[in-house]
Image (cartoon, grey):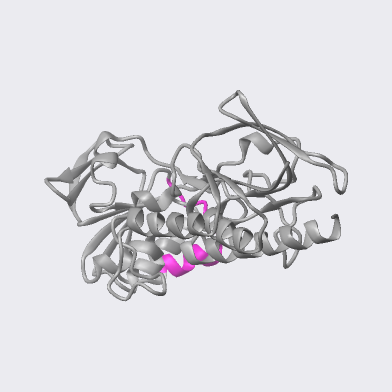
Amino acid sequence: MIECTIIGSGPAGYTAAIYAARANMKPTLIQGMQPGGQLTTTNDVENYPGYPTGITGPKMMEDFLKQAERFGTNVIFGTVTKVELSKKEGESHKIIVDNKNEIITKTVIISTGASAKYLGLPSESKFMGSGVSACAVCDGFFFKNQDVVVVGGGDSAAEEATYLSNLCNKVYLLVRKKEMRASKIMQKRVFETKNIEVLFNHETVEILGDNSVSGVKVKNNLSLDEKIIEATGFFLAIGHNPNTEIFKNQLDMDETGYLITKPDSTLTNLPGVFASGDAQDSVYRQAITAAGTGCMAALDAERYLANNS
């Protein structure tokens, strides 16, 4: 029987693996469909300590993986398709990989992450990492003193637009409806920020450019008039979907699907099951905070095993 199984890779999963392996828990890590998680779609990472000249997301995740393997983590490429989590203290859990391979484990660390919602435009995927981003905090610095477009009408969009307004020359906020969904205080901040222009009833038609974004074609969905906004950045702020579907009806979640953990810990509502990274974090969603909760999950799992040996 395996002592610790980690579902998902990325900063949370790999960090959990490093700590679990160093604690002699002999962890198995199941990478999932996108080994390395969302960071593998990020060209440049400049805000993670220890990389003074920056690093690409894929290379950074490769380093994390090598470090986890160095301490003896058993890394499996595959996707968890079913879980049967025990409700009793000290009992094992069952994990099914790719609908066929069964893993019996004493503890489970969930680090399945979250996926940003996209508009589904071909030009969106074309310029991903070359002007298109779903994280202003991650990538805003690269657009300093430039004009950018933010899509969304909720608190996240308002927050991203306000954040970018401190870096960028001009921020265009595209809101599909006639009003924003954001809280009143967030709307007030947006409307009081001089270099944010809110375009209500506007949708994205196409993202323009050659090797990188140079403009955005938008449409007024009332008049159907189209125009081109000159911009070098296009930020999506229409929400994230936590990758937690397989845990429904077993683990406590909020209305969006983020796993709920007990205060000041990574403990879920079931014994021996821990959640880390973006699967349980709808607020920060940064590589460094994900890595921090990965560390916490491994330490929580180690304590659990010690108490149930």
- Bounds of the magenta segment: 178-191
* Extreme-left residue of the structure: 210
Q: Residue 34 lies in what quarter of the image? A: top left
Report the number of discs: 0
Compared to residue 157, the image places residue 222 above or below, namely above
Residue 163 as seen in the image, left or right of residue 128: right
Q: Nearer the viewer, residue 62 or 130?
A: 62
Residue at 35% across / 35% down in the picture? 120
- Residue 209 x %, y %: 14, 46
Compared to residue 179, the image places residue 121 above or below, namely above
Residue at 33% across / 62% down in the picture? 139
Q: Residue 76: say if magenta.
A: no
The quarter of the rendered structure image containing the N terminus is top right
The quarter of the rendered structure image containing the C terminus is bottom right
Residue at 39% across / 68% down in the picture? 163
- Residue 55 x %, y %: 31, 64
- Residue 202 x %, y %: 33, 44
Q: Residue 102 lies in what quarter of the image? A: top right
Q: Nearer the viewer, residue 4 or 297?
A: 4
Q: Nearer the viewer, residue 286 or 120?
A: 286
Q: Residue 183: say if magenta.
A: yes
Asked whether residue 155 is in view, the answer is: no
* Extreme-top residue of the structure: 100
Residue 220 as seen in the image, left or right of residue 64: left
Residue at 81% across / 39% down in the picture? 86
- Residue 38 x %, y %: 42, 49
Residue 124 as seen in the image, left or right of residue 248: left
Asked whether residue 92 is in view, the answer is: yes
